[in-house]
Image (cartoon, rainbow, N blue to C red):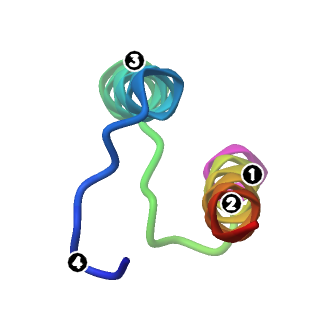
Amino acid sequence: MPGRPSQSKPLQYVGALVALIAIVGYVVFDWRFGESDEIAPFVIGVVCAILAVGWTLYQRR
């Protein structure tokens, strides 16, 4: 349901891992998640979006 947090532990762990990767990438590798010239942040964002949509569709079944 939109606006309701997920109670799924695996999905929460994935979210925490992605946040950790984003923070380390920002601090260590100087990634900027709004620029179009870097591929790594873009790929991470696409994977997260696909995972979120896939999980939502899986939960609706």
Q: What range of the chain is rendered magenta? A: 38-42
Q: Any mark on residue 3, and which?
A: 4
Left or right: where 3 falls relative to 43: left
Closer to the N terminus: mark 1 or mark 4?
4
For this rendering, which residue is in front, 45 or 11? Answer: 11
Under circle 1, the secondary element is helix
Extreme residue toward the front, this view: 61
| Label 1–label 3 contact, CB within 8 A | no
Amino acid identity at mark 1: Val
Which residue corresponds to mark 1? 47
Q: How many marks?
A: 4
Q: Any mark on residue 32, and which?
A: none
Closer to the N terminus: mark 2 or mark 3?
3
Amino acid identity at mark 4: Gly
Closer to the N terminus: mark 4 or mark 3?
4
For the residues labelled 4 and 3, the Cα–Cα distance comes to 33 Å
| Label 1–label 4 contact, CB within 8 A | no
Residue at point 52% right, 22% down? Answer: 10
**Mark whose residue sits in front, 4 or 2:** 4
For the residues labelled 2 and 3, the Cα–Cα distance comes to 17 Å
Question: On the rendered image, what quadrant is the C terminus found in?
Answer: bottom right
For the residues labelled 2 and 1, the Cα–Cα distance comes to 9 Å
**Mark whose residue sits in front, 4 or 3:** 4
Which residue corresponds to mark 3? 28
| Residue 17 x, y percent position in the rendering | 46, 21
Closer to the N terminus: mark 4 or mark 2?
4
Left or right: where 15 falls relative to 41: left
